[in-house]
Amino acid sequence: MYSQNQSMFADDRIIGMFWQLRDLHGDLLDGRLDRIERKRLGGQLSPIGPGLIVTLAVQTSRQPDLFPDTPASSEALLAEQRVASAWLLLRNRLNDMAQLASDAHLTAQARVNSKALPFVRKALAEQPPLAVKRSDAPARNLALFPAFLCLVSYYRSQEKTRARNQAAAAKAASPDAAAASPDARSRKLTPSPPPKHPEKLRAEADLGTHDRQEILHGFHDYLTSRYRTSPMQDLYAREDPAHIAQDDFW
């Protein structure tokens, strides 16, 4: 579309379109949200939101006496929903316009690039055409030197970026890097401890049972002194060690 109507999209008309959006842009500035506010408000959205609001407003408006606890009247709910829907309509229109402007920019920039870049490459790599006098060649090259410098700098930056990416890929694929990665370390099998002798296991189990009994007796003495009564049955059942299974207590 842009290539077929170049005269309709001269730079002055495009700038005019830009300034036509000034008032709209200014009106929208007050509603800008930060990242936290967008996340907080976005959690309250739902695909059924508009339909639910309209349904609620219609149903509560038929018998309003049955719904004195509604957050707002049916008319207010519908008015707020119309505002939200209007903003959505405007958003969709502006998004479509932004995509169209992006496509027009892509078409225009690609067209002019396809004219300038091949010319600079050819002028950098080849001799001047025959129409240019040999004595004028230095002046021609000097005039094109800023363009040559721009193109060469771009190529060098591309080569550096490509070299960094290749080095990073090679480092990631090397065995040393794979062994040093956290995932590789986590995949290493940790040596299992040597098996304990059955007598040692039995002794540790007996020691644990003894420690638990000592703690239970100490807990019993504490409760007895707290409530100033010695008989076990005088304690609350929930605090009586006799009513507490050892497995549940620990």
Image (tube, rainbow, N blue to C red):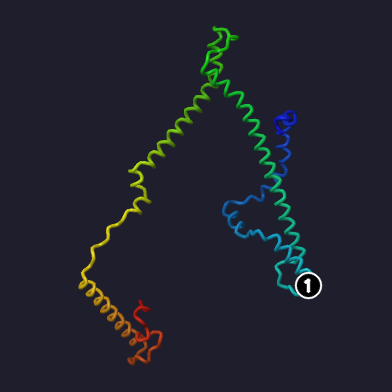
Q: Is mark 1 on a helix, strand or loop?
A: loop
Q: How crowded is mark 1: few (under 14 residues within 10 Å), some or many (20 or more)?
A: few
Q: Is residue 43 left or right of residue 14?
A: left
What residue is rendered at 44% in x and 31% in y?
A: 160
What residue is rendered at 34% in x and 80% in y?
A: 246
User: Which is more toward the observer, 186 or 46?
Assistant: 186
* On screen, residue 78 above or below 88: below
User: Which is more toward the observer, 79 or 6?
Assistant: 6
Residue pointed to by mark 1: 63
Q: In this view, does 130 lie to the left or right of 180?
A: right
The quarter of the picture where residue 18 lies is top right
Of the 4 image quadrants, the one containing the C terminus is bottom left
Percent coordinates x, y for residue 134 in the rendering: 54, 7
* On screen, residue 76 above or below 209: above
User: Which is more toward the observer, 196 or 99?
Assistant: 196
The quarter of the picture where residue 234 lies is bottom left
Q: In this view, does 143 lie to the left or right of 186?
A: right
The quarter of the picture where residue 94 lies is top right
Q: Residue furthest right?
A: 62
Question: Of the residues shown, which amino acid type is indicated by label 1?
Answer: Gln
What residue is rendered at 52% in x and 21% in y?
A: 148
Percent coordinates x, y for residue 30 in the rendering: 67, 50
Percent coordinates x, y for residue 153 in the rendering: 49, 26
